[in-house]
Amino acid sequence: MDGLVLPESQKMPDNLVLASYNIHRCHGRDGRHQPERTRKVLHQLDADVVALQEVELLRDEPRLLEYLCEGTSWTAIHGPTLERRSGEYGNAVLTSLPVRSMRRIDISQGGHEPRGALQVVLDHLGHSFQFLATHLGLWPAERRAQIKKLLAILHDKEPAANETEFTVLMGDLNEWFLWGRPLRMLKRHFLPAPAPATYPALKALFALDRIWVQPREKLLRVTAVNNHLTRSASDHLPLVAELNSGRSEQPAQNH
């Protein structure tokens, strides 16, 4: 899809727009570090909640998240997973919704790069919703263990999440195998959801980035945003979903 994701003529005013985007440390396909290009992509999405992966807060550029939020109503929640000489690296959530609670979850598996998830409970129109934003590991056994831990957290909700009306898990799952056990576990919990290809950005072939919603009927459409800017700003395309915050019988669409 070229251009904006959800034109105002299609988006219902009470619906939520969610996005997941691996920003690749703000390095584009040309190898250049250009946060302004990343910010342009994010502002184009105009989402209520954005899960970011590969966020690097350089020591000489510590206010990256504030910069990405400039000109919007977003606030940033940082979820660093490792410390490098150059700065902190990990996940983040940008949201324009009131935050009821937040916690950082360690899903690291021994011998592999540290990984994490952000569990955030947000308010929308007087209702509470739970979001898990994550970036899974590169190895199959690692991802299986991480999904098991995240699903266990969803089954055993924290007090702040007990009254939430729906749950979202989103992020870069790094799952290349359509028949892989992590996807089978997620489908059993959330039911199948559209999965447009998002990687590599220039010619997307793999659905590494996912948005899962429970109850499933709240998910209206899922879109990989494919235009000149998104193909150049990162090695992943952004993934965007529209959710009905009330009742809906419309099936989710894959764009």
Image (cartoon, rainbow, N blue to C red):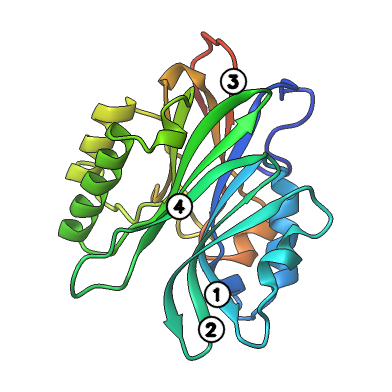
- Crowding near pointer 3: few (<14 within 10 Å), some, many (20+)? many
Q: Nearer the viewer, residue 74 or 143?
A: 74
**Residue 232 vertical position relative to residue 88 in the rendered view, above or below:** above
- Sequence-first tag of 4 and 1: 1
Tell which circle, 4 or 2, labels the residue nearer the N-terminal end: 2
For discs 4 and 1, the disc positioned in front in the rendered view: 4
The residue tagged 1 is 56
Marks 1 & 2, CB-CB < 8 Å contact: yes
Whether residue 31 sits left or right of residue 109 in the image: it is right
Answer yes or no: do the residues labelled 3 and 1 have beta carbons within 8 Å? Answer: no
> CB of mark 4 within 8 Å of CB of mark 2?
no
- Of callouts 3 and 1, which one flags the residue occurring earlier in the amino acid sequence? 1
Residue 162, given in percent of the width and then of the height, sits at 41, 28
Which one is in front, 177 or 242? 242
Tag of residue 244: 3
Q: Amino acid at mark 2?
A: Gly
- Which circle marks residue 87 in the picture? 2
Cα–Cα gap, marks 4 and 1: 19 Å
Q: Position of residue 48 (x, y in %)?
A: 67, 39
Q: Residues within 10 Å of mark 4 (few under 14, many from 20)?
A: some
